[in-house]
Image (cartoon, rainbow, N blue to C red):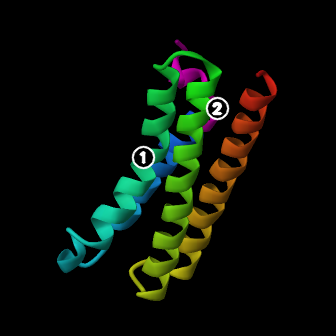
Amino acid sequence: MRDFRCLQVWEKAHTLVLEIYRASVAFPVHERFGLTSQIRRSAASIPANLAEGCGRNGNAELARFASIAMGSASELEYHLLLARDLQFIDVTNYQKLHEHTVEVKRMLAGLQKSLTADR
């Protein structure tokens, strides 16, 4: 069992969730149960899956949950694009959040690679 807080990718993903929550506050009220909920859930799923993987037994389990986190990061990437196209977030904010998401995805890929190399 590992402490998820020691993973740099978890820390980056957690920071991303906080940024997503701040950005989505300005979304239209009628989207509270739509895109606002979806974008927040997909973002929060990334560090949550890393935390769950750290609580499991061994690198294989952590790699599996890192893979699930990667799927959530890809989902978030699309939700951000949709929010931009619907003009819920401006281009500058979109770019910042997108770059942060891509960085998390790169880190997740690195974690997955290191975990599967240990097998």
Membership of 90 in magenta stretch: no
Nearer mark to the viewer, of 1 and 2: 1
Viewer-nearest residue: 106 or 66: 66
Give the x, y percent position of residue 8: 64, 32
**Helix, strand or loop at mark 1:** helix
Residue 1 appears in view:
yes
- Residue at (53, 36) in percent of width and height: 65
93 displayed left or right of 35: right
Give the x, y percent position of residue 73: 54, 55
Give the x, y percent position of residue 112: 70, 37
Membership of 4 in magenta stretch: yes
- Residue at (43, 58) in percent of width and height: 20
The residue under label 2 is: 8
Viewer-nearest residue: 83 or 68: 68
Mark 1–mark 2 Cα distance, whole angstroms, equals 16 Å
Magenta residues (range): 1-9
The residue under label 1 is: 45
Q: Which mark is residue 33?
A: none
Viewer-nearest residue: 109 or 83: 109
